[in-house]
Image (tube, rainbow, N blue to C red):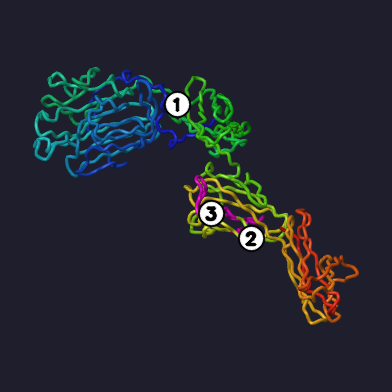
C-alpha cells in the first residue's frame, strides 16, 4: 500500500497517543564548544527584536513530541518566541509570554531561557535551520545576542548583557537538546532585577506544570553544571540563574531523551468533489491519507464516511482499489466513495471521515458539503422554458461563482455570478424576446434586482446578451435584463443563462419569453378600372389569436371576393395584376360597405403544426357601379 505524504494538509495531529514528558530522561554534558548556525531562515534580526511569536515555522521533518494527553504526537511545524522558547505544534502563541513554564496558556513547550528578552544590539537575531540528511536531520532554533528586557536607564548591567543559546530537535530519535554559547552578564552574578528564566520542557497540559524542568534557587547548591530536575510548583522554581556565578559555560548541553516515541499517526484530509450537490444527485467523498512519520507502516487500514447527513449511514466504507465506490486510482492514498444525496432542503452538511488501522491508530477529518435545491446551477440541469411567463426561479441557493467556462460577455464589465441555466426550443423560425423585467420601477422584497441574460445557439455562440435594460419597467435603476429580436430556428435547442451581476445579487425572478414568427407582408400593387386603387392589409397571423384581413379603395357597395391559396402564386397581367387564379383559389364572397371597405375576421387555432405555413391573399372588386379591380398580394406566414 502506498501512502501520500501531505505535509501541507497534516501539520500537527490531535491524537491522545503520546508519552508524558515525565518519561523523558535528562542528561547534562559539555561536549563543547557551542556551534552557531549561519544558514536557514532568519525570523528576525536587529536591535528592535522584542516580544514576537512566529507561528508555523517549518521543522523540515516530522518531529515526535511526547506529551500527556490531547495534542501529543508528531508535528512538522513549530512556533518560535523571541523570548527564548518554542512550541511544538501549529497552535498560536503569545509574544508576551515569558515564563512558559507557569503560563496557563502554553503547552508542548521547550525553552532554553524563557523570560522577557530583547535584542542586546544590532547584531541580534532569531534563526532556524535544519541541518543534516534524512533520517538524521536536526532542526536548530538559535537566539543570538539577546539580553533581559530593561528600559534604557533601569539597569546599566543588563544593558551590557548578551546571551547565545539554541534548542535542537532531532529527527527519528525525538531527542531535545538545549545548548549554550557565550553568556556575558557584566558581573559574577545576575543582578536581582533579572530574576531568572524558565529552562526545560513542558507537556500538553497548558494549565498545569507537571513536566521536567531545570530549576535552581538562590542557593549555591544548584548550578548549571548540576541542575535541579524535579517537578515542582511554578511559584518557587523552574528557573536558573539567580545565584552568584549562575550562568552556563560555553558548550553546555541539556539533553532530553524520550523513553519511547509517539506511535505512528494517520493524517486525513477529507473533501467532497464537487463540494456542491443537488437533491437527487451524487456526492463523491474522498480522503487523502498521510502518515506521521512518513516512514511509518500501517496494518489493515479501514476508512469510513459518516454520510448520515445526506441520507446515508454512519459507517459507509471507502476504497482505494481503483474500482469500487467511485475510486479512480488504486493505491494512491486517496480513498473514495460515491453516495446519493437525499437531503430535502438546502443545507450545509458535514461528512465525518475516519481511518483506523489494525492497532487502533486513528485519524479523522470532515468533508463540508453544500446541498442546493436548484439543479440548473449547472448547464446539465437546465430547466425548460416555455413561451410566456416562466418561474419564479431563485438563485439564492446557488454557487456564488459561475459555472465553469461561462461568463457574461456584455454589460458593465461584470462576468456575472450565481448563474442558472435554461433550455428554449422554439416552435417556429423567427425571433424571440426574453426578459426578467418585472414591469415596475422598483424591486419587490427578495427579488433579484440586478440580472444578466445570455442566449447561446446550439454551437455555443452568443446570439443574445443584456446586462441592464434600463427604463422604468425593469426594477430599481433598470438593472434587470432584456434581450430582443434574437433569431431562432424551429426545433433547435438554445441555452439560456440568467445570472446576478455579482455574488451579492440573488433572489427570485421570472423569465418572460415572447416569440415573433408570424409575418404579414405585401407585394405588388392593386388597380381598378374605375380609377380607384384597391389595397389589401391584415393583422399578424398569430396562432391562437384573432386577426382581420381588410380591403379598401373600392367603390361603395361593390361586390367583393376574397381569394386565398398557398403561397407561390404566379402573376397574370391583364391590365391589373392577377396573383391568384380565381378558378383554383379558395373564394370568400363579400361586399364593400358604403366607404368601399371590407373587413373579414380570421381566428387561428394554437396548433404548432401550422407554424410556418404561408398563404397568399388577394381581393377582387366586382363592377357593380365601377370598373373591375384587383388588390395587391398579401402573404401571411402563421406563427407566434
Lower position in the chain sequence, tag 2 or tag 1 = 1
Residue 108 lies, in percent from the top left, at 32, 26
- The residue beneath circle 1 is 265
Residue 545 horizontal/vertical position (percent): 73, 57
Q: Nearer the viewer, residue 552 or 278?
A: 552
| Quadrant for the N terminus in the image | top right
Residue 429 magenta = no
Q: Which residues are magenta?
A: 435-464
Q: CA distance from mark 2 to mark 1?
A: 62 Å
Q: Is residue 84 left or right of residue 17?
A: left
**In contact (CB < 8 Å): disc 2 and disc 1:** no
Q: Is residue 6 above or below residue 441?
A: above
Residue picked out by circle 3: 440
From mark 3 to mark 1, how far is it between C-alphas? 63 Å
Crowdedness of circle 2 by 10 Å Cα count: few (<14), some, many (20+)? Answer: some
Query: Which of these two is toward me, 48 or 490?
Result: 490
Dot 3 or dot 1, earlier in sequence: 1
Instruction: Identify the disc placed on residue 486.
Output: 2
Closest to the observer: 220 or 521?
A: 521
- Quarter-of-image position of residue 571: bottom right
Could you say where residue 374 lies in the image, as x and y percent from the top left? 58, 41
- Disc 3 packing (10 Å; few <14; some 14–19; many ≥20): some
Amino acid at each position: 500500500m502506498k501512502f501520500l505524504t501531505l505535509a501541507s494538509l497534516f501539520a500537527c495531529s490531535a491524537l491522545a497517543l503520546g508519552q508524558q514528558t515525565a518519561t523523558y530522561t535528562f542528561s547534562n554534558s559539555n561536549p563543547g564548544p557551542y556551534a552557531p548556525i549561519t544558514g536557514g531562515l532568519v525570523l528576525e534580526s536587529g536591535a528592535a527584536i522584542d516580544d514576537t511569536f512566529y507561528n508555523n515555522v517549518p521543522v523540515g521533518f516530522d518531529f515526535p513530541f511526547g506529551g500527556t494527553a490531547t495534542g501529543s504526537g508528531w508535528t512538522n511545524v513549530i512556533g518560535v518566541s523571541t523570548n527564548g522558547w518554542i512550541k511544538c505544534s501549529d497552535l498560536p502563541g503569545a509574544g508576551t509570554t515569558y515564563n512558559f513554564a507557569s503560563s496557563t496558556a502554553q503547552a508542548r513547550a521547550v525553552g532554553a531561557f524563557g523570560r522577557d528578552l530583547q535584542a542586546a544590539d544590532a547584531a541580534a537575531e532569531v534563526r532556524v535551520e535544519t541541518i543534516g540528511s534524512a533520517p538524521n536531520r536536526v532542526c536548530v532554533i538559535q537566539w543570538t545576542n539577546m539580553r533581559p528586557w530593561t528600559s534604557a536607564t533601569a539597569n546599566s548591567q543588563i544593558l551590557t548583557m548578551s546571551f547565545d543559546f539554541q534548542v535542537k530537535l532531532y529527527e527519528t530519535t525525538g531527542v531535545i537538546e538545549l545548548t549554550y554559547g557565550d553568556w556575558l552578564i557584566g558581573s559574577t552574578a545576575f543582578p536581582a532585577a533579572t530574576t531568572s528564566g524558565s529552562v526545560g520542557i513542558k507537556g500538553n497540559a497548558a494549565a498545569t506544570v507537571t513536566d521536567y524542568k531545570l530549576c535552581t534557587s538562590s542557593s549555591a547548591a544548584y548550578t548549571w553544571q548540576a541542575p535541579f530536575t524535579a517537578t515542582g510548583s511554578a511559584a518557587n522554581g523552574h528557573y536558573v540563574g539567580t545565584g552568584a556565578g549562575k550562568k552556563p559555560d560555553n558548550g553546555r548541553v541539556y539533553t532530553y531523551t524520550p523513553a519511547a516515541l509517539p506511535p505512528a499517526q494517520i493524517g486525513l484530509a477529507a473533501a467532497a468533489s464537487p463540494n456542491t450537490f443537488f437533491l437527487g444527485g451524487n456526492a463523491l467523498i474522498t480522503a487523502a491519507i498521510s502518515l506521521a512519520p512518513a516512514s511509518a507502516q500501517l496494518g489493515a487500514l479501514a476508512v469510513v464516511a459518516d454520510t448520515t447527513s445526506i441520507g446515508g449511514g454512519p459507517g459507509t466504507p471507502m476504497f482505494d482499489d481503483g474500482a469500487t465506490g467511485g475510486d479512480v486510482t488504486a493505491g494512491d492514498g486517496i480513498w473514495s466513495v460515491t453516495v446519493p444525496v437525499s437531503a430535502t432542503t438546502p443545507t450545509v452538511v458535514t461528512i465525518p471521515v475516519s481511518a483506523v488501522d489494525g492497532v487502533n491508530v486513528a485519524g479523522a477529518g470532515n468533508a463540508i458539503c453544500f446541498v442546493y435545491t436548484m439543479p440548473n446551477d449547472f448547464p446539465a440541469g437546465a430547466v425548460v422554458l416555455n413561451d410566456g411567463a416562466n418561474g419564479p426561479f431563485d438563485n439564492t441557493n446557488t454557487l456564488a461563482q459561475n459555472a465553469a467556462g461561462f461568463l457574461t460577455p456584455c454589460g458593465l464589465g461584470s462576468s456575472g455570478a450565481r448563474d442558472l441555466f435554461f433550455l428554449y426550443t422554439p416552435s417556429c423560425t423567427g425571433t424571440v424576446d426574453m426578459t426578467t423585467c418585472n414591469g415596475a420601477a422598483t424591486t419587490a422584497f427578495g427579488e433579484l434586482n440586478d440580472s444578466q441574460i445570455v442566449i447561446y445557439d446550439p454551437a455555443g455562440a452568443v446570439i443574445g446578451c443584456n446586462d441592464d435594460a434600463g427604463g422604468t419597467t425593469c426594477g430599481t435603476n433598470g438593472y434587470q435584463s432584456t434581450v430582443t429580436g434574437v433569431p431562432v430556428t424551429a426545433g433547435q435547442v438554445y441555452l439560456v443563462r440568467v445570472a446576478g451581476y455579482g455574488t451579492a445579487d440573488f433572489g427570485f425572478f421570472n423569465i418572460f419569453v415572447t416569440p415573433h414568427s408570424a409575418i404579414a407582408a405585401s407585394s405588388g400593387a392593386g388597380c381598378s378600372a374605375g380609377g380607384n386603387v384597391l389595397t389589401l392589409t391584415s393583422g399578424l397571423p398569430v396562432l391562437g389569436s384573432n386577426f382581420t384581413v381588410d380591403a379598401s379603395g373600392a367603390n361603395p357597395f361593390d361586390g367583393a371576393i376574397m381569394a386565398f391559396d398557398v403561397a407561390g402564386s404566379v402573376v397574370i397581367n391583364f391590365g391589373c395584376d392577377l396573383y391568384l387564379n380565381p378558378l383554383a383559389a379558395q373564394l370568400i364572397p363579400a361586399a364593400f360597405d358604403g366607404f368601399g371597405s371590407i373587413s373579414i375576421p380570421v381566428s387561428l387555432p394554437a396548433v404548432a403544426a401550422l407554424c410556418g405555413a404561408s398563404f397568399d391573399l388577394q381581393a377582387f372588386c366586382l363592377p357593380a357601379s365601377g370598373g373591375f379591380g384587383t388588390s395587391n398580394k398579401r402573404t401571411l406566414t402563421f406563427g407566434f
